[in-house]
Amino acid sequence: MESIIRIAENHDLKQLLPLVMQYHEFEGIQQSLSVCEKSLAPLLATQQFGYILILEQKNRLIGYIAVCFGYSIEFAGRDAFIDEFYLLPEFRSKGYGRQMFEKICDELRQNGFKAMHLEVKKSNKKARLFYEKWGFNNRECFNMMTHSISN
């Protein structure tokens, strides 16, 4: 079936928000709808901090990848962090994830990015295998640690 992959814009918020909330529920992320909406706004309005790649089929949003930009001394240049990646359950294991990853990798490479990072739950074996096929390596000697500095 014909699908379209494109960068999300402000007018996509209404369709995107329910998918983001489904992803948060799946991952056990506690975030209110209003905070989620405010968090998406900068990625939809400008590509300064990153962007959201969406997958559409018959004008229906069926998946997204949120990528945020950074810089790494270790990797000698710009890096990207896949913050969220979600496909509706009925569209998984049908090649759509591969299509989206091909698109995101090509775009980042063409724009001079040196590395791409992501987090995946240790218990999500299917996702871990998918990412390993794309060349992601578990850096056993490092642990990602987070400290929230917001009020």
Image (cartoon, helix red, strand yellow):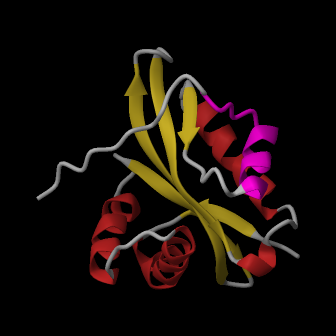
Q: Position of residue 62 (x, y in %)?
A: 67, 77
Q: Of 55 and 20, which appears nearest the observer?
A: 20
Instruction: Give the image quarter of residue 115.
Output: top right
- Which residue is rendered at x = 39% and y = 34% of the image? 70
Q: Is residue 54 visible?
A: no
- Using the image, determine if residue 80 lies above or below residue 19: above
Q: Is residue 146 left or right of residue 128?
A: left
Q: Is residue 143 left or right of residue 137?
A: left
- Which residue is rendered at x = 57% and y = 35% of the image? 116
Q: Position of residue 46 (x, y in %)?
A: 35, 55
Q: Position of residue 31 (x, y in %)?
A: 34, 74
Q: Position of residue 101 (x, y in %)?
A: 71, 49
Q: Of 7 and 145, which appears nearest the observer?
A: 145
Q: Of 111 and 29, which appears nearest the observer?
A: 29
Q: Of 119 and 19, which appears nearest the observer?
A: 119
Instruction: Give the image quarter of residue 151.
Output: bottom left
Q: Main secondary structure of the magenta part?
A: helix
Q: Is residue 133 visible?
A: yes
- Which residue is rendered at x = 54% and y = 79% of the image? 22
Q: Which residues are magenta?
A: 125-139
Residue 95 covered by magenta stretch = no
- Using the image, determine if residue 137 lies above or below residue 22: above
